[in-house]
Image (spheres, rainbow, N blue to C red):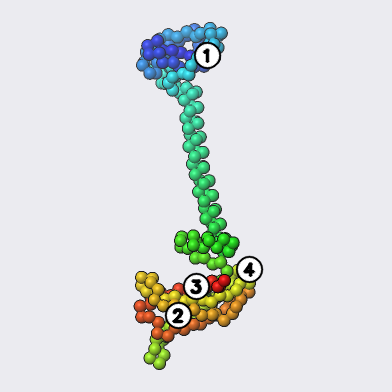
Amino acid sequence: MILTCPQCATRYQLKGSEFPISGRSVRCAKCGHTWFQTPPAPDTEADLVATSAPVHGETGASSPGAGPQRSATAVGVKDRVRGERVAIVAGWFAFAGIIALIVWGLLRYQQAITRVWPQAGPIYRAFGVSVNTNGLTFSDVNYRRDTEAGQLVLTVRGTVMNADSQPAALPRIEIVLTDSHRHRVDSWVFSAGARQLEPGQRIAFTTRRVNPPEQARHLEMVFLRPKR
């Protein structure tokens, strides 16, 4: 049933089955006006519920001395809002999980990706990820400076390994020397002594440079791409 405050015309919705047949005093939760309300006839009550406009206000009418009670409409709205918030949070967690899975796949299978799509190499390098398209890796790299016959000699030693599951051609290797600002000051190219490495195979190498620049502070090694 719907009650209307005679003072401020605020309307409230109550269950007719809970309203006493003899009527009772009710108080408007908005303006505080109190009046005696009798229940409508059964056929009138059904007509009111079916044809009435949306009820204003989120708090229902109450008996004098009793606190305001939440209407079913207000409870439903709050439950719906709470459900929407939970859905949004769950959606963000799912989105973050998908992004993490994509990043993991790009890093885990970067060798296969760059092999099929070489243009992806610069993208990986832009994010500081080293690109290995042929499965070859350097390990146990070390260098030493010696003086021989009055000349400074830089000796570089290391190992090349084929970490791929298939044979890989072993290209020539370039060593680049840079200064403290990472500017190139010297470079040279050498061969590790084999043309191809089987899966899991290793090969040791040694290369020397006579009189390297004094300003050289860093050493980098890269595999040269075969000429087409």
Counting residues from the start of the chain, the first of labels 1 and 3 encountered is 1
Amino acid on which disc 2 is placed: Tyr
Q: Earlier in the sequence, mark 3 or mark 4?
A: 4
Closer to the eye: label 3 or 4: 3
Q: CA distance from mark 3 to mark 4?
A: 21 Å
Instruction: Report whether 17 appears left or right of 126.
Output: right
Residue 14: image location, x then y, percent: 49, 17
Whether residue 141 is visible here, answered yes or no, is no
Location of the C terminus (image quadrant): bottom right
The local crowd at label 4, few if under 14, some if 14 to 19, many if 20 or more residues have their Cα within 10 Å, is few
Residue under label 1: 51
As shown in the figure, which amino acid type bears the numbered disc 1?
Answer: Thr
Mark 4 and mark 2 lie on one chain; the one further toward the N terminus is 2
Labels 1, 3: front one: 3
Residue farthest toward the front in the current orientation of the protein: 228
| SS for dot 1 | helix
Q: Is residue 173 above or below residue 40?
A: below
Give the CA distance from mark 4 to mark 1.
Answer: 76 Å
